[in-house]
Image: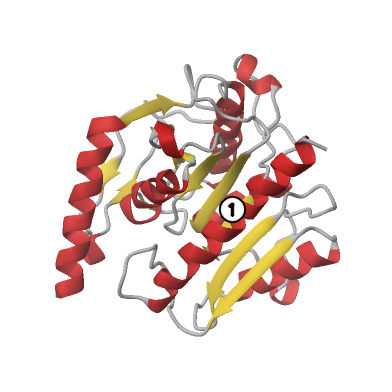
Amino acid sequence: MKFLFFAIVLSGMFFTSFAQDSSLIYLWPGNVPGETAAKHPPEITGDHSGGVTRLTDVTNPSLTVFLPKTIHRNHAAVLVCPGGGYSILAINLEGYEIARWLNHLGFTAFVLEYRVPNNRAGALQDVQRAMRIIRSRAKEWELDPEEIGVMGFSAGGSLSARISTEYDHNWYKPVDAADTVSSKPDFTVLIYPAYLDEGPHHSLTPELTINQDTPPAFIFQTADDPYGNSSLVMASALRNAKVPVELHIYPKGGHGYGLRPGNPAAEEWPPLAAEWLKSVIQNHHANYHL
């Protein structure tokens, strides 16, 4: 009960902050590719268990922009993909709260509302379009266009892995000048990812084509997570392709914990990921000045 009260209060805090200093960008200025339904606001489900706000029926995909304080800004960005089984989006737990944490680290964060429910093809179009919009407008947000990564949770981890490995294919017809830039993430963070082991005998999902050009990755999961094999097969494929990868398997924590206190895994991954992200940015700066 104490944790639930904390989660509800925390959720309210983030929604208040969201209303004050965040901005919303719709991905598709005209028709949404492959959609026949009219655009409308997403539906908030009646399930608020665990203090989680769940969105569904997304027909007008969007980005919510969270800017760090100028004094902390590192000129890098992260596109955040919430999870929810491709059915809903855990928008506060794995979206807004993550964005605020990234802001604290100096990153500009973009929370993606991709199409749900049950629209993996549409979600891939949305994440590709989102990456291109961010990179094409990097100057506007004072970003280095070569320091734009993606971070995903559960199904959002699946989506992040897909854009990190399928970025070189155009998944929709170009809309405007933004679609002339690359949709390749410069780094990838996967927190309790799901659906990465849908190949034969729980091997790597066939659509994930990993090679030496795949961006470096940080992966965190727990041994008792029912989707835990996703991290193992993904990390193995990255290692075999000689892609830099950092994998952490924590004993307990389950699935879907975000970064809220009270779960040991939720308290373990943020400092590890923060240190990894710092090293990725530092390495890029060092290579740039060589």
* 167 vs 263, nearest the viewer: 263
Residue ID at (18%, 65%): 6
Residue ID at (84%, 66%): 240
Residue ID at (70%, 40%): 285
Residue 113 visible in the displayed image: no
Rendered-image quadrant of the N terminus:
bottom left
Residue ID at (76%, 70%): 236
Is residue 180 left or right of 26 when viewed as pictured?
right
Q: Residue 140 location in percent, x, y?
A: 51, 19
Outermost top residue: 177
Is residue 20 left or right of 234 when viewed as pictured?
left
* 74 vs 205, nearest the viewer: 74
Q: Looking at the picture, does residue 57 appear above or below residue 38?
A: below
Is residue 256 left or right of 144 when viewed as pictured?
left
* 199 vs 71, nearest the viewer: 71
Residue 85 visible in the displayed image: yes
Q: Residue 66 is drawn in which quadrant?
A: top left
Badge count: 1
Q: Looking at the picture, does residue 286 appear above or below residue 270?
A: above
- The 10 Å Cα crowd at callout 1, few under 14, some 14 to 19, many 20 or more, is many
Rendered-image quadrant of the C terminus:
top right
Q: Residue 27 location in percent, x, y?
A: 48, 26
Q: Looking at the picture, does residue 50 appear above or below residue 46?
A: below
Q: Residue 45 location in percent, x, y?
A: 25, 51
Q: Amino acid at mark 1?
A: Leu
The colour mode here is secondary structure
Q: Residue 113 location in percent, x, y?
A: 42, 40
Helix, strand or loop under label 1: helix
Q: Which residue is mark 1?
A: 277
